[in-house]
Image (spheres, grey):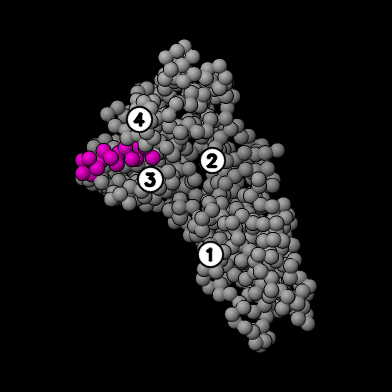
Amino acid sequence: MTIYADNAATTKMGQTALNAMLPYLTDGYGNPSSLHSVGQRAAEALVGARERIAACLGASPKEITFTSGGSEADNQAIISAAELGERNGKKHILSTAFEHHAVLHTLEKLKQQGFEVELLPVGSTGTVSAEMVSSSIREDTCLVTVMYANNEIGSVLPVAEIGAVCKEKGVLFHTDAVQAAGHLHIDVKAQNIDMLSLSAHKFHGPKGIGVLYAKQGVSLRNIIEGGAQERGKRAGTENIAAIVGMAAALEEACAHMDENGKKVSAMRDRLIEGLSHIPHSALNGDPLNRLPGNVNFCFEGIEGESLLLLLDAKGICASSGSACTSGSLDPSHVLLGIGRPHEVAHGSLRLSLCEWNTPDEVGVILDVVPKVVEHLRNMSPMWKDLESGKRQFVL
Amino acid sequence: MALYTEIVMDHFMNPRNVGAIENADGIGEVGNAKCGDIMKMYLKIDDGIIADVRFETFGCGSAIASSSMATEMVKGRSIEDALTITNKQVVEALGGLPAHKLHCSVLAEEAIKSAVRDYYERNGVPYDKSRFPNCESCASCQMV
């Protein structure tokens, strides 16, 4: 039996999305730019999907641009805002220390081009307040980009409040909503969001497709040159099947959001409660404002990759912010960002649930994780040093 | 393809010679918590032969597997033999490691050497310092 608890990495595609896609992977193969009937059938599907996705976000269809996913949407949003800013002599960008790398690496590139990038600290719970954003906005700020919810530790940020502050100060506001879309309520107008990125595979849609919402009047800079698709803002023949699958998945997720949220957060809370009994462990992220499916713990004295391998051997799929799993020497910038020291950040475990997980699976996880942690601690010289007092416990 | 070979997974899931040795004749500890790997090696020496060896490791799957394999490679051999074991031999015995995990095999080699050096120092045996890597910095691992 496999217990899939890594839904923040990707989700299993749903039957709804698959059913919606199949016709466009078979007979509906047309290119929507073609004038003939086969092409026009695809063009109609594209129009329909755009309308349905716009409706889910409280946007209008012409504000929706299809991209290859969340990363491309983040890149394009930030580059577009930076270019607009530069034209007006504004080269200050405000963001947070724990954004996704799609945002951070794009900002890094802009920094090399002469932009000033300010990353707000996220504190021990992993959030920023609208007041912090407000007091950091300057005359020359051209963009505020703050994620809706953090992918690793699940903190949900006050985007509506941040949106209101940005509107008041006349600064563009982008939010990376990859973890939020389909799970948390989004209304771009009410929340004063100027640009928003989302990705279909985080809500049971297909991979390789996403959306960049940009408010009417916010001019996008195309980062892929070519044909006139997407109003000339994103070249390349549209992936109709994926777009239609994304629309179906988002509609379904939004229709069942409250009921799924209740079910998933109940399982999350049971996991958090149960795992917190493991000695010298700590929950990462905001305990209250938290994604419904996110559980993230640090266990002192052990390393995350070996934890994942042992869990996998027991059929549990999870992830970790340890350096070993990231392929770099440093553990997750998110865990370091909330002040976890390196040696503690190495011992992190993220479990991310969806509505297809079951209470029985939660029971298995609660049975297995403490045993695996104990097994690894028993062979850890660091744990021995902690227990003997040679090294001080942090958690 | 899986991340690790079957041999690595076997040594990770069923590590050999785990634990400590009471009154060990030599103890070596290498790596550091910040990097996410600490390896501790305990030796029992009889007449210049490694009669028993145990390890404790804080680290990833390949760190635990490398420690386990290294203990098997030195057990029953002379100290001089044990000192000739290289990280490459550990990697070969494991059927290979991913490139970004090679430093784990270096730690295993250094843990053995560090334990032998401790034995030499405790017993006042003169030794050639150049044969023992300096684990104070992480540089020797990063050169792999």
Q: Which residues are magenta?
A: A75-90
Q: Is label 3 in a helix, a strand or a loop?
A: helix
Left or right: residue B93 versus residue A175 is right
Q: State the image coordinates of residue A10 (x, y, percent, origin top left).
A: 54, 37
Left or right: residue A16 versus residue A129 is right
Q: Is residue A31 above or below residue A188?
A: above
Q: Are marks 2 and 4 on the same chain?
A: yes
Q: Is residue A125 above or below residue B25?
A: above
Q: CA distance from mark 4 to mark 3?
A: 18 Å
Instruction: Give A208 or A144, whichever is nearer the viewer.
Output: A208
Q: State the image coordinates of residue B72 (x, y, percent, origin top left).
A: 75, 66
Question: Most prominent secondary structure in the magenta stretch?
Answer: helix
Q: State the image coordinates of residue A279 (x, y, percent, origin top left).
A: 59, 56
Left or right: residue A258 versus residue A111 is right
Residue at 78% x, 73% y is B76
Proximity of marks 3 and 2: CB atoms separated by less than 8 Å: no
Q: Amino acid at mark 3?
A: Thr
Residue at 49% x, 14% y is A38
How crowded pointer 2 is (Cα within 10 Å; few <14, some 14-19, many 20+) is rated as some
In this rendering, the label closer to the viewer, 1 or 2:
1
Instruction: Identify the disc placed on residue A106.
Output: 3
Say which chain tag 4 marks.
A
Q: CA distance from mark 1 to mark 2?
A: 29 Å
How crowded pointer 1 is (Cα within 10 Å; few <14, some 14-19, many 20+) is rated as few
Say which chain tag 2 marks.
A
Q: Are marks 3 and 2 on the same chain?
A: yes
For mark 1, what is the residue? B142
Residue at 42% x, 22% y is A50
